[in-house]
Amino acid sequence: MKRLFFALWPDPETRTRCTAVAAALKQAGRPVRPDNLHITLVFLGSVDEATETKLVEAAAAIRFAKISIRFDALHYWRRPRIICLSGKPEDSAVALLVEQLNTIAAAQEITTDDRPYQAHVTLIRKASQLPPLTLEPFLWQADAFCLVESCSTPEGVAYRVLKTWQAYEDQTPIDSEAD
Ligand code: ATP
Ligand code: MG
């Protein structure tokens, strides 16, 4: 079984920005490794190979628009003891994608988080409070989403991108090279 989730992966510039904010907060707990920074779309949990294959097939059929989320606030979430960036979507693209991902998970009888979707980037784990820090707002733009495996390693959790799907605006027309 693999521990899987759907996520948005940062482009290099976005990763650098998030890493800088996490570094500024490093006294507050344990910063997330830059390689692990992401936005969870839908957490799936333990999935067997046959189910993974069906999820991949279903995900490939999803049409979604480019995503743009404005991150302008830091929060401390007490229960998971994390500090995260919380974002506001610029339009309905991410909500529509999350809804479709929940639907394909439900079709495989996977129970997903039923709380309202809140886009966030976990920056610090094992935190006990949010230190004062002024955040310069920024946009996280994504033209793809991915299926990610959460692997536990001796050095801590590591996320591995298994598959990536592009937003429809970026898809080359199928007949572009015909004739
Ligand atoms: P660890 O659990 O080992 O401390 P982690 O939380 O980073 O590490 P996972 O638990 O595999 O790693 O989670 C992967 C991603 O899915 C993280 O972004 C996590 O916040 C999110 N996630 C995990 N469990 C749930 C859940 N039940 N509902 C929604 N999101 C979840
Ligand atoms: Mg976890």
Image (spheres, rainbow, N blue to C red):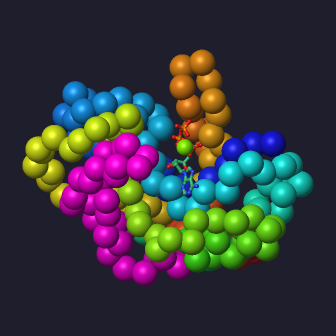
Query: Total of numbered circles in the picture?
Result: 0
- Residue 175 position in % (x across, y down): 70, 76
- Secondary structure predominantly adopted by residues drawn in magenta: strand
Q: Quadrant of the C terminus?
A: bottom right
Instruction: Please say whether residue 88 is one of the residues in the magenta stretch.
Output: yes
Q: Residue furthest right?
A: 50
79 up-or-down from 159: above or below: below
- Residue 137 position in % (x across, y down): 18, 58
Residue at the image position 83 percent from the left and 62 percent from the top:
54
Residue at the image position 48 percent from the left and 63 percent from the top:
143
Magenta region = 68-97
Q: Residue furthest top?
A: 154
Q: Can you tell which quarter of the image residue 23 is in? A: top left
Is residue 172 in view from this perspective?
Answer: no
Is residue 111 found left or right of 57 in the rendered image? left
Residue at the image position 11 percent from the left and 44 percent from the top:
132
The residue closer to the viewer here, 47 or 35, is 47
